[in-house]
Image: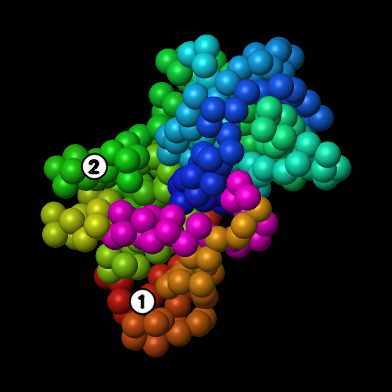
Amino acid sequence: MPELPEVETTRRSLLADVVGARIVAVTVRERRLRRPVAAEFADQLRGRRVAGIDRRGKYLLFELDDGRTLLVHLGMSGSLCLTAPSTIPLRHDHVLIDLDRDRRLVFNDPRRCGLMRVGARDELEELRAVGPDPLAAAPTLDEWKAMTRGRKMPIKSLLMDQRLLGGVGNIYANEALFQAGIRPRRRAGSLTRAELARLAEAVRAVLEHAVALGGSSISDYRDGNGNPGYFQIHHAVYDRDGQPCGQCAAPIKRLVLSGRSTFYCPRCQR
């Protein structure tokens, strides 16, 4: 958390208030994020106008009027929310960006696993390791086949490899595999063309559904306006260990793959 749907929901919720606004002040209350916030960070942003907000995988990209980009990664627990400039900062409000529209963009990150940096788009090395976006630039079936060919890794681990597919994390890998009827431990290279076609469609459908419902608010996720998501109500397998499958009533199983809790239906997934 947050994964592609939460990041895309955040992006959309910020468009109206942030695009076109000028940054008038920047306060860095805590520099110790995943990578320390640069000493010149505030100076790089102050006075700049936000020309647009893009997304690449799990990264938010604020395009500035000088051609540079503010890159934001929400990490495990981060959020970007709009408040009034007079709002008293909370304990984990690490970066405050005041806009000329009497709005403040607040980066909150209890675990400090997030990232904020400014640079030219082609200089942001984080983006070089992000694979195709399953919504904005979904791989073709032939590309899926090439991606999985000969790979012995579990298909769930492949789905979560950001170098191969940008944005899919634990929640949506579980849900897409259930919808496609594929067990998470299956070797990626063993999937047939028909199974890959089902999986490609399931990934797209699950992500689109999640975005439409504002993402999943498992713990503290909120969008840019402080609203929770509702896709967690529709989770078919994620975090439902021991509960009956909605399709066949068999108990949902849990196992650990690559250090992550993994959920599946032993009857519906093969």
Which residue is depicted at the point 49% across and 24% down? Answer: 51
Q: Is residue 93 above or below residue 24?
A: below
Residue 214: in magenta span:
yes
Question: Which stretch is magenta?
Answer: 202-225
Give the residue at the far bottom of this rendering.
Answer: 249
Which residue is the site of mark 2? 139
Q: Secondary structure at mark 1?
A: loop
Residue 93: in magenta span:
no
Q: Earlier in the sequence, mark 2 or mark 1?
A: 2
Which residue is depicted at the point 62% across and 57% down? Answer: 227
Give residue 62's position: percent from left, percent from top: 53, 28
Give the CA distance from mark 2 to mark 1. 28 Å
Point out the frontmost of discs 2 and 1. Answer: 2
Q: Nearer the viewer, residue 193 or 73?
A: 73
Is residue 214 found left or right of 46 in the rendered image? left
Q: Nearer the viewer, residue 67 or 60?
A: 67
- Bin the neighbour count of mark 2 within 10 Å (Cα to Cα): few under 14, some 14-19, many 20 and up: some
Q: Nearer the viewer, residue 112 or 11?
A: 11
